[in-house]
Amino acid sequence: MLIIMKSGSTREDVDRVRDVIRGLGFDSRPLPVAERLAVGVVGYDEAPHPDLFEALPGVDLVLPVNHAARRVGRQARDGDTVVRVGDVEIGAGTLTLVAGPCAVENEDQLMSVARLAREAGADLLRGGAYKPRTSPYDFQGLGEDGLQLLAQAGRETGLPVVTEAVDEASLALVEEYGDVIQIGARNMQNFELLKRAGKSRRPILLKRGMAAGLEDLLMCAEYVLDAGNPDVILCERGIRTFSDHSRFTLDLAIVPVLERLTHLPVFVDPSHASGRRGSVGPLARAAVAAGADGVMIEVHPDPVAALCDGPQSLRPEEFAALAANLRELAAVVSRVRETVS
Amino acid sequence: MLIIMKSGSTREDVDRVRDVIRGLGFDSRPLPVAERLAVGVVGYDEAPHPDLFEALPGVDLVLPVNHAARRVGRQARDGDTVVRVGDVEIGAGTLTLVAGPCAVENEDQLMSVARLAREAGADLLRGGAYKPRTSPYDFQGLGEDGLQLLAQAGRETGLPVVTEAVDEASLALVEEYGDVIQIGARNMQNFELLKRAGKSRRPILLKRGMAAGLEDLLMCAEYVLDAGNPDVILCERGIRTFSDHSRFTLDLAIVPVLERLTHLPVFVDPSHASGRRGSVGPLARAAVAAGADGVMIEVHPDPVAALCDGPQSLRPEEFAALAANLRELAAVVSRVRETVS
Amino acid sequence: MLIIMKSGSTREDVDRVRDVIRGLGFDSRPLPVAERLAVGVVGYDEAPHPDLFEALPGVDLVLPVNHAARRVGRQARDGDTVVRVGDVEIGAGTLTLVAGPCAVENEDQLMSVARLAREAGADLLRGGAYKPRTSPYDFQGLGEDGLQLLAQAGRETGLPVVTEAVDEASLALVEEYGDVIQIGARNMQNFELLKRAGKSRRPILLKRGMAAGLEDLLMCAEYVLDAGNPDVILCERGIRTFSDHSRFTLDLAIVPVLERLTHLPVFVDPSHASGRRGSVGPLARAAVAAGADGVMIEVHPDPVAALCDGPQSLRPEEFAALAANLRELAAVVSRVRETVS
Amino acid sequence: MLIIMKSGSTREDVDRVRDVIRGLGFDSRPLPVAERLAVGVVGYDEAPHPDLFEALPGVDLVLPVNHAARRVGRQARDGDTVVRVGDVEIGAGTLTLVAGPCAVENEDQLMSVARLAREAGADLLRGGAYKPRTSPYDFQGLGEDGLQLLAQAGRETGLPVVTEAVDEASLALVEEYGDVIQIGARNMQNFELLKRAGKSRRPILLKRGMAAGLEDLLMCAEYVLDAGNPDVILCERGIRTFSDHSRFTLDLAIVPVLERLTHLPVFVDPSHASGRRGSVGPLARAAVAAGADGVMIEVHPDPVAALCDGPQSLRPEEFAALAANLRELAAVVSRVRETVS
């Protein structure tokens, strides 16, 4: 077990940590990790609970010794990674709102959503041109035509565009037309695609796989960073469980845990997680309250007629009202978090 | 499929619903449910998505025909159930904060937590005198002595007391000393205990089992109501999944779904769900933002020395700061929800 | 980590184990556990994989140091627990077949199933007089009348009777009329009921809860043994997962793991796990092949008309054919296991 | 709901089915599906349980109306798909044994395992040249060098080779050097890779994703068949659940369900599912008993030194003993299944 000290920690902080370790009957030894000081705990059969140390002054985080997340772990750098896309700063303490349709269907649909999203205060435009679909007989997206529409919508509204790549060929095109490259949940452990994403100059939005544990997710981001791309945004979008009142189970508890372990920004996608329009608002609010850096919301001008995921899409006016709420909530949460850990 | 109309719905509302049903190629027939009007959809192979109807004016909720939750379902009554305990009104639109130690350990511990909880603005005092523990060798609670201490703490602080019953004998004692009877997650489907709880004059706090689906939970509440006790508070406390960064996976998406389906109040317990002090604050905030009627927080004067669940307990001053945050957040959420569904 | 040696292990065996530990860079120390010798491994950050030791000569099993299963763990005694019920020896190396209806419905139904089960080679008769049902409006069992019918069927056929108790009152009656007391999955962690079962002179059939991990199950058996009853049969009956092609996911991998860790016999219930008649045969065969000591099969003379769980019940003639298969398979498996671990 | 009749079903069989439908209060209509007759059930709110029909004479299988598995579903053809690889016929009623190391490490390791596997009666040689690994810092496989070694081992032993492709480039090489192309669990929903696999002339071994439901798995096979490749072998390898005594939870109940729904052969991989050497034998036997067409076993000459998945690999002599057991068991199971559904 490694206890990583904050960069401004004092000699007294370190001594206090070592006293607690001694009090628990273990030995300790100081050692450097990246450019910071750490205290190693040795001589135990079963590791003491990390929360015993994380509350002590000067302690940044507690890691298992075999922690493999060398580059994405908080021990790797001071402060948070801020991903810059156009004028948007993701992870800099403000809430990023991503809005748009599940799939790009045609120019009218996309332009109308993009303009309304812009007016409602969205920061980024989302929309799929390559759609991984459970069935080969479902609409698979417009491909490069869809990317061109997205690029046009981005130019007209000034909103940077997030869109998904599903293999190396589509990634090259997304790189050309888009601003942020999404790797979807089903491809989270498509390691060849991650290695390729690591060579891109575009930020990567990496969605958590529906069977992925915390460490799985972090290691997939590690693939991207290790290949050279430092700009990864993690995104919780629900996991597979027995609970059947929502499409997936949104695992919001991962948000504060990721915040503690990694310097990367964290988004939440309540639309895919719940699969129900009526739950998107409450879950988006919950995500902001849990400390998410951004929220992704599906918006469609006519949800009933959508080619993909209609039942979970908000109408533009619903999104506008929700966006205002989320901004207000984020302000309270941000103030509040300064007073309470 | 049954579409239950709001009590103030108009003839036009009903006609609009029937038009949509016709447009989807199905037949409809109006019929009474409890004292309200419903529209039955017939003639389908696969039910249309309920969200297609829930957004229409005048529609209260959409239920499958075989819905068995006769008494807990929203179709059973107009408006929400408000559970009154002393001066506290649970489910009346204000946030209820429940605080206290996992287990009652001794008079000093309990009195100090109770007083600090009261000062910090808690509405109810929680504490276990009967503790269901995984191992027979773990501390099993003080039993009736613990109940007496709880009653004393309740009297001194004026806070009503919530405490768990684990069988018929302990339920009779909890009824005598306490104000709200908790049925824990491991006993959620202890149907004999539920039937007995249904004969009590005390409100029941029913925690969701860790393998319980939505319908399982609702039907357990139905056992209590069916046996004669109308005052049940449901409580989400995390489910068992593969995700191992928290003790259980807090399933906050159930909060808006329960709000749509049942008139009963809904609490959330982030302490047991996460099992980590550092996650309790973010998840409590998320619960309030998702629309929970109350939040249960474990508080202990000295978490490291706690006989039970120390790593997830907040110190009293941490709880005080969190309570203030949650009140502020609840005010924003409450205002916000009037403008957005 | 504790490495428990077999009772006949030699000095050379122990030395070899300690050499391997030294080779991995750790220290070791010999120490007694119950009446056997163990080797403790110390000085590691992360425990080496137990399989590295379990294959060594003389090693019985490898346990974490904090292993709480004092009485049910293999370290507690030499050899297997054999539960004797009438002439049936459960866990003695032969396959025990338990058959009967989900619920006792009436004399005709029960007697006809009991006779046919007997003819088909069943060892024990099962049938529920107290039925824990999800809905309060479902058939809850015949209660004491059902127990009397079971006792009568047991007398007429000579088959000992397994039936479920759901609280202390029903347990007292099951003790009187039945031969083996079943604690169902929903009551697995009803610890008060377990303590009461531990005071009974009847063997306990303990079904795994649908959210119970390995350690949860073992500790529930520990409650019973700790309270004085040594005769517990464990039963795997499926867990709650996202997989929706069967009612529960039958976790057969627990069978060899339990066999390694505990001396108690292990049954499998493929009927409740699958919920589909067509899957009961294949899963029963799989259970026997995985090494289960017994299999529980629901049998009903007219599955379509059953008051409970009809779709998963076999007709008596289907059970007869399956029973013959299982006996044949068990003979092969038993022979085979002598040659391969 | 569609009830598909066997190709040799009679007029009486169809009338009987329609009588049962009428008895349940629904209407029916006969209609052709592929080249067979089906009976459609109409007029229900909730579908009757399929098992009510599957036991009737002449009935082949029961499908929901919206069943999308057009090509992999049993309604698409009579009889089973038999995949031919060299002299091996997979799915033809005999047990196929696949053995080899997790990863190809070097010539000595591979050749020695290959020879011993051959002697022990394996039908196919497995071994990974491209390894999808959770961490970028783990051994990623030998790539094309590994494929060349596999091809050499295949030539020397006469065993056809199964090996994994992880993207389009590696798939092209696997096509050249190998005999069966494996798509791993993490790439199951890598739809672009599936489309490419559908253009191959090699059979595809498709492993179930760890969060994949039954329908997800079938639809991924549908992608391959729809793109032109009829030869797909499905493989159960464990799903992610809370149960932590094995690496994944082997979901054997899917074997009989797949057998009912699809004509494709089904394999089981107990090595990856359990992650423990001591459980591989029991689970392999269980898979055969459940009706699997083949079993994949990891074999390594020195498991402790393996670069990948050592703790779950059998030694060659352990595999030899197990292989003999499985053949013997398969013979019994095969005979047994003719007498019982």
Image (cartoon, coloured by chain):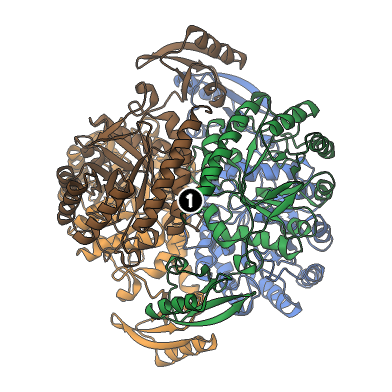
Chain colours: A orange, B blue, C green, D brown
Residue closest to the eye, D203 or D109: D109
Percent of width and height locating residue B62: 56, 33
Left or right: A200 with respect to C309? left
Q: Amino acid at mark 1?
A: Pro
Residue drawn at x 81%, y 71% is B145
Left or right: C270 with respect to A98? right
Image height check: is B121 above or below C317? below
Q: Chain of mark 1?
A: D
Report helix, strand or loop for mark 1. helix
Image height check: is C41 above or below B249? below
Question: Which residue does the numbered mark 1 point to in the structure image?
Answer: D282
Residue drawn at x 79%, y 67% is B143
**Residue A134, image quadrant:** top left
Left or right: A156 with respect to B252? left
Dot 1 alpha-carbon crowd within 10 angstroms: few under 14, some 14 to 19, many 20 or more: many
Percent of width and height locating residue D68: 37, 28
